[in-house]
Amino acid sequence: MARCAGIEPCTLIMDLEGTDGRERGEDDTAFEKQSALFALAVSDIVLINMWCHDIGREQAANKPLLKTVFQVMMRLFSPRKTTLMFVIRDKTRTPLENLEPVLREDIQKIWDSVPKPQAHMETPLSEFFNVEVVALSSFEEKEELFKEQVASLRQRFYHSVAPGGLAGDRRGVVPASGFSFSAHEIWKVIKENKDLDLPAHKVMVATVRCEEIANEKYSSFAANEEWCELEAAVQSGPISSFGKKLSSILETCLSGYDGEVLYFDEGVRSAKRKQLEDKLLQLVQPAFQSMLGHIRSGTLDKFKDAFDKALSGGEGFSSAAHHCSKFYMNLFDEACADAVIEQANWDMSKARDKFQRDIDAHIASVRAAKLGELTAIFEAKLNESLSGPVEALLDGANNETWPAIRKLLRCETESAISGFSDALYGFDMDEETKEKMLASLENYAKGVVEAKAREESGRVLMRMKDRFTSLFSHDSDSMPRVWTGKEDIRGITKLARSASLKLLSVMAAIRLDDETDNIESTLTLALVDSPSNAATNRSITNHDPLASSTWEQVPSSKTLITPVQCKSLWRQFKSETEYSVTQAISAQEANKRNNNWLPPPWAIAAMMVLGFNEFMTLLRNPLYLGFIFIGYLLIKALWVQLDISGEFRNGALPGLISLSTKFLPTVMNLLKKLAEEGQIPATNNNPQRNPVRASMNHQNGVSTSEISSTASSGVTSSGNGTEYSSPRKEE
């Protein structure tokens, strides 16, 4: 193989052994066919030397070889146009015009006899081959003429690939840079006796070389300093003009590839370019996604801030959501357009939809938070406006308690729902959702009342005892009741218990639906009526009206205290209030005894009969009467000062102990007072002292008569105004 000297463009010539060469070995046809196929596969022009006298012969004219070549070519789906130049050597006197038709006729017969695939049944020979016939004279006999004919033939190889040249209509051209690889692979296939697909070898060469070039460009791009800096920078934050910068780097890489594969098969280089482009886009896609993530997160943060400021500024929720959402969606679209890579046809709708979902999710979360705050505010108002009043109404339970609670509930609920409905106006929600929220608030109000009622029902026993104590221990003026012996304890007890039973009946069930029930009458009949009536009723009805876990006409969900629980509570209430009644009766009897100081009439009569002599003695000697009177006064003063009746009111032993500690100080106080009074001169020569003294006495709360008698005074005055008092128990 050598380069033809002086022939343009560059032309390589390959000299094969030809047929009947000694190098073929024992196989007469194997190498012959292999070399022929190899020449056909790699050459644009195949020169076939043929002796002039072999024209018309079978073997000598290489007809079997040509038939094999044609059969191989017929297997090609995309035929490779090759020029077959038959060179007739040692031309005789027979004119070329006579030889050429014979040769062409033989070739056409070979073509017609070759079995053809369905796709080429009607394909002419000219579609696969250009047939040229030239003749050369004998070198031995006509050397000069031979050289002239060879020189003429040589001239036909100048610009042979140009239009009109010998190979001007060639197809399936392999670039020079891929010729070595192509020839190697073709010979390898021939040696392995595989079927040939000559265009596939051209494609194979283009595939290998284009793939190598593509890999080189990919590696070059991956190591590109500008790309590496861009990739590192995008990890930490957004980059301005990201799309333009990356598109420029990609375009430079792809342009370099296009320049190096310009002469390879167009289909292959386009396919490999697409693969290279896909690999490059796959390489840059993480950076692009990072850029989109920065755009999305940054724009979303800006949206959140703007949305919060709009709401804080008093703008309506729906209006703020609409305006902010529209503005920042446009801002996101602009930022994405700046990040778009020209070579990538990536769909941005998914990123946009995700950002829209993020905005919608934030709006929904803020709406839920705002609605939760509004709901909590109105629920707190309802709780404040209902809990205290309901507790107070239940504490003072009477026939008007539940009507008053219903009225309170209705007024407060209507007020809260009206305010809540106005507050929901700016949230642009559908009527169904709004109605559900208003209904939920209304149910909450009912729940507050029911919860408070259930809470109070748990303290009903304490409430009953408090009411009983209030009515039993205080009179109609709310003053503490003193059991003097004139009060009707039975009637007061019945009144107090009836009031407590009223409280129990009110607390037994929730009555928010304005429906009547017979709870009070059932409790009164079973618990307050006389035992005889109750026994009669039980004998008639043959059952206890409270022996049940439900009330008539009252659903279990509205029941606070069941009949059985009411009976148990009433029994416990009576047992715990029985002591107060017993104490009242005891106090009344003690008061009666304390107020009756006179002895019995028979004792008075006995004293008059037995003390007649002593009485007459006192009448005869008035001095005894004076001593008796003075003793009476002293005893009276001690009685008042010591408060003997009050001390013994708590019992005899406590009274004696208290009197024993107070007796001596009280006696000493009286004696001191008498001594001080005896030191004051009673003379009429200094009349000014009496008013002063009287004034002092009155200032200290002691009258002249009180000092003289010393019976009813509990205070004595000294010259310096100091007060002294005997111990006295206060009530």
Image (cartoon, rainbow, N blue to C red):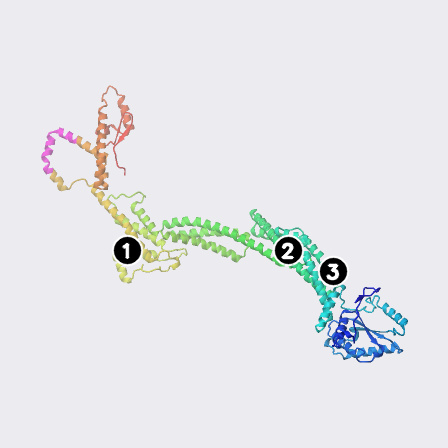
Magenta residue span: 608-629
Instruction: Say what amino acid the circle numbered 3 marks.
Output: Glu
Q: Is residue 344 left or right of residue 629?
A: right
Is 614 contained in the magenta span? yes
Residue 666: image quadrant is top left
Q: Whole-percent x and y of residue 157?
A: 84, 68
Instruction: Say what amino acid the circle numbered 2 marks.
Output: Phe
The answer to whether one can see residue 341 in this image is no
Residue identified by numbered label 1: 529
N-term mark: 3 or 1: 3
The answer to whether one can see residue 530 in this image is yes
Camera-nearest residue between 452 and 222: 222
In the drawing, what numbered circle is on residue 288?
2
Q: Is residue 668 left or right of residue 330?
A: left
Secondary structure, mark 2, is helix
N-term mark: 2 or 1: 2
Instruction: Say what amino acid the circle numbered 1 marks.
Output: Asp
Residue identified by numbered label 3: 260
Q: Is residue 11 left or right of residue 652?
A: right
